[in-house]
């Protein structure tokens, strides 16, 4: 090692101290060299500069043909990790680790994994065999110093730097230590800084004396060491996850009371943040979908509306993002069906609610007189017989197959074709078929009616008979007005007075329909506005998989949010089933048009005041604001805790850095520690958040908030909330560690150790 005109200054209490003033000398590759001098003469500074623990202002240090002057921080870390071993006056052991782990750390920073044998051998060399499991605070001063020597020699360094190694030891222990260092100097260079001249003359091969930052004595001043051209193998620090985790967990022993208090306070704050997030991110999709499946509902309808007049909001409503509009029912267009089919499914069904007769009780009743005998036959028939239909409907083969229906013939392919149900077919079977010219044909099988024309209705040609399996028992059990109608109490059944007659429950959906093409319904929408401004319904058969319905509902909600800001058009789900009325108690109170339920009375006007047509509900916005406040508080609290924890471990940071750890290794240690703490806070917070969210599903809370009687869960600690909270906890941990450690990147290991004080 060649030292050339080293100069080092530093600031101390505002004053500039010239620690080294042009120091130059050569050192051999082996032997024991003592550097002597009074306190403040610069000997410890010289040792720190030669070992890469500190930098220098000018001059140079040449080791194995390489100049330390041009070394980057990473190269200095590698130099210390690969070539240097340290024995400090104050031992600089990590008290949270046992003897084995303190020594093993030097090897683990070099990327070694199986280190037990080397650690045991190093302990044997210093006379501490069997001490591997001891805690540092159980050792005497001499034993601690020997552990420090074992940590130094375990990685077989080319140079050992010892700074006042006997300063805290008695004379006998000091003599044993110097004897050990002398033995080690036979095959490596040992540089010892000491006040002990007697030890220097006893053990030293060479003595260099400093005074006021200059070399004033050298017992071998004329000795010149030939600087070899061979170089050393640089090793980048590679601290494994297991070793980093072990060191991270040891840090929890610092200030345990403060750790517990911080965790509890953070859990409290994070819980309120999580609850605010649950409310702020609340979506009606999940409870709506769950309600549909728990109610065994098989069909939903989807209507189309457009926004109307915008109502002025007060200051509070504007602050909360609360806007009010009226809405108006509008008819479907072909592009609506195309849009929904392309995004969702080709199997959506369109229905026109229009009550009519295929024969009998209308202006052509005389052609088919219904005598009392005939009515008795109809009432007593085992198979259901009907002469009426409640609308036009599109259907696909997939829907037929899924419901186990049987289609005799084929589905309509053009707008002048129609499929009837077995209920209508049974009517023809009973009465026969009468064509335009008055010819009557006997009908015995479905094939007999296929290809005949329903001439009353724009010349529909019957292409098939759909057998739904609905007999008289099925019809009577599912039709609420059947007895009164047969008893003659009700002669005019219309949706305006009896909307329940037009229920879309499973057994009532298919058997009172004409089946036509979707295009026919689209083209004739304007013809059927007698009972409702929007008499065309889009039926969504509830899919077997919840994910498919969620996809549909989310698409509708997403489209609505875009539609408000553009064309002002939105869709609205309307489950026409008594099974879902309890959901209406809640949803209609909130009036979110993406999933809201229509009032059950069909004669109620659809142009009604909508209290919250925007998807951002005021309660959600308020919770979002509160959540932001709790988040900021939690974030600042955790950042302060992480910074305080690392600041209290500054000396430990310096020790790890002195052993050759680069910033990545140091960040891994303290980052893991922060991640574990923040992860624990996150997990502990989930319990009260889950309990709190579930509490709002209680009937008492629902009643208090006027949500109606609910048998389903409204609020969920959903996966997105959990993932969001987890991400926030991890980002806080990693970012907080980075912020807390950033100042150490500018400091040398010697500066960090000087600043550090383990409390």
Image (cartoon, rainbow, N blue to C red):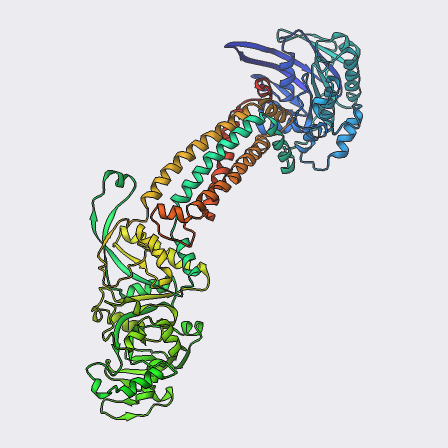
- The quarter of the picture where residue 375 lies is bottom left
State whether residue 351 appears in this view. yes
Could you tell me residue 156's position as x and y percent? 74, 28
Whether residue 737 can be seen here? no
Image position, residue 173 (x, y; %): 78, 15
* Vertical comparison of 315 with 75: above or below: below
Q: Classify the position of the N terminus by image quarter.
A: top right
Query: Is residue 24 depicted above or below 699 in this figure?
Result: above
User: In the rendered view, does 448 fall on the left or right side of 671?
Assistant: left
Q: Is residue 371 above or below residue 503?
A: below
Residue in the image at 42% along x and 34% along y: 630
Front residue (pair 152, 464) = 464
In the displayed structure image, the side of residue 363 where residue 485 appears, left or right: right
Nearer to me, 531 or 16: 531
Q: Residue at x 73, y 23 (%)?
A: 147
Quarter containing the C terminus: top right
Residue 607 lies, with reference to residue 448, above or below; the image says above
What is the x, y in percent for residue 104? 70, 31
Q: Quadrant of residue 656?
A: top right
């Amino acid at each position: 090692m060649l030292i050339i005109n080293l100069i080092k200054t530093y600031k101390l209490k505002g004053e500039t101290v010239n620690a080294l003033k042009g120091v130059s000398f050569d050192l051999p590759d082996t032997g024991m060299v003592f550097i002597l001098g009074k306190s403040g003469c610069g000997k410890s500074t010289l040792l720190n500069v030669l070992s890469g623990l500190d930098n220098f202002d000018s001059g140079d240090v040449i080791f194995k043909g390489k100049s330390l002057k041009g070394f980057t921080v990473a190269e200095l870390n590698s130099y210390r990790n690969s070539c240097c071993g340290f024995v400090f006056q104050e031992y600089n052991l990590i008290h949270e680790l046992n003897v084995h782990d303190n020594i093993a750390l030097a090897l683990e920073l070099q990327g070694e994994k199986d280190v037990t044998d080397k650690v045991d051998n190093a302990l044997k060399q210093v006379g501490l065999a069997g001490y591997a499991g001891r805690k540092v605070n159980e050792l005497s001063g001499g034993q601690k110093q020997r552990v420090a020597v074992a940590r130094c020699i375990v990685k077989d360094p080319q140079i050992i730097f010892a700074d006042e190694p006997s300063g805290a030891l008695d004379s006998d222990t000091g003599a044993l230590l110097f004897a050990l260092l002398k033995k080690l100097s036979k095959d490596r260079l040992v540089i010892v800084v000491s006040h002990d001249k007697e030890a220097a003359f006893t053990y030293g091969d060479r003595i260099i004396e400093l005074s006021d930052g200059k070399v004033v004595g050298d017992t071998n001043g004329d000795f010149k060491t030939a600087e070899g051209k061979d170089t050393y193998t640089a090793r980048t620090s590679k601290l494994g996850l297991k070793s980093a985790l072990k060191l991270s967990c040891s840090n929890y022993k610092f200030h345990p009371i403060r750790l517990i208090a911080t965790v509890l306070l953070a859990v409290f704050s994070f819980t309120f943040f999580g609850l605010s997030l649950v409310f702020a991110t609340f979506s009606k999709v999940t409870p709506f979908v769950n309600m549909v499946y728990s109610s065994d509902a098989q069909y939903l309808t989807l209507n189309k509306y457009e926004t109307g007049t915008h109502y002025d909001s007060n200051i509070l409503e504007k602050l909360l993002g609360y806007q009010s509009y009226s809405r108006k029912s509008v008819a479907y267009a072909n592009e609506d069906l195309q849009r929904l089919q392309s995004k969702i499914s080709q199997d959506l069904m369109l229905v026109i609610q229009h009550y009519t007769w295929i024969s009998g009780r209308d202006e052509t009743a005389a052609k088919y007189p219904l005598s009392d005998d005939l009515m008795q036959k109809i009432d007593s028939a085992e198979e259901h017989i009907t002469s009426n239909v409640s609308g036009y409907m599109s259907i696909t083969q997939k829907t037929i197959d899924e419901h186990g229906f049987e289609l005799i013939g084929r589905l309509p392919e053009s707008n002048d074709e129609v499929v009837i149900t077995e209920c209508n077919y049974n009517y023809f079977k009973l009465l026969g078929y009468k064509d335009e010219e008055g010819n009557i044909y006997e009908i015995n099988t479905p094939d007999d009616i296929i290809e005949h024309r329903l001439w009353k209705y724009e010349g529909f040609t019957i292409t098939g008979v759909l057998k739904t399996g609905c007999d008289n028992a099925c019809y009577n059990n599912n039709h609420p007005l059947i007895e009164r109608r047969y008893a003659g109490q009700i002669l005019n059944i219309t949706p305006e007075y009896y909307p329940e007659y037009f229920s879309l429950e499973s057994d009532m959906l298919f058997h009172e329909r004409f089946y036509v093409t979707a295009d026919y319904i689209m083209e004739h929408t304007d013809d059927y506005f007698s009972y409702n401004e929007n008499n065309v319904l889009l039926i969504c058969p509830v899919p077997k998989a919840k994910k498919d319905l969620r996809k549909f509902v989310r698409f509708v909600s997403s489209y609505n949010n875009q539609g408000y800001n553009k064309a002002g058009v939105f869709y609205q789900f309307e489950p026409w089933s008594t099974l879902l009325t309890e959901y209406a108690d809640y949803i209609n109170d909130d009036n979110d048009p993406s999933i809201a339920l229509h009032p059950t009375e069909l004669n109620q006007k659809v142009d009604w005041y909508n209290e919250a047509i925007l998807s951002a509900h005021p309660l959600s916005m308020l919770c979002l604001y509160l959540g932001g406040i709790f988040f900021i508080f939690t974030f600042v609290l955790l950042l302060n805790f992480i910074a305080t924890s690392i600041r209290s471990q500054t000396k430990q940071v310096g020790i790890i850095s002195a052993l050759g750890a680069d910033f990545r290794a140091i960040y891994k240690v303290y980052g893991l520690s922060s991640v574990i703490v923040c992860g624990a806070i996150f997990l502990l917070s989930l319990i009260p958040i889950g309990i709190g969210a579930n509490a709002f599903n209680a009937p008492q809370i629902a009643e208090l908030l006027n949500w109606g009687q609910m048998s389903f869960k409204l609020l969920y600690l959903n996966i997105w909330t959990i993932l969001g909270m987890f991400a926030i906890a991890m980002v806080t941990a990693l970012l907080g560690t980075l912020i807390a450690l950033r100042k150490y990147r500018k400091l040398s290991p010697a500066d960090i150790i000087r600043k550090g004080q383990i409390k």
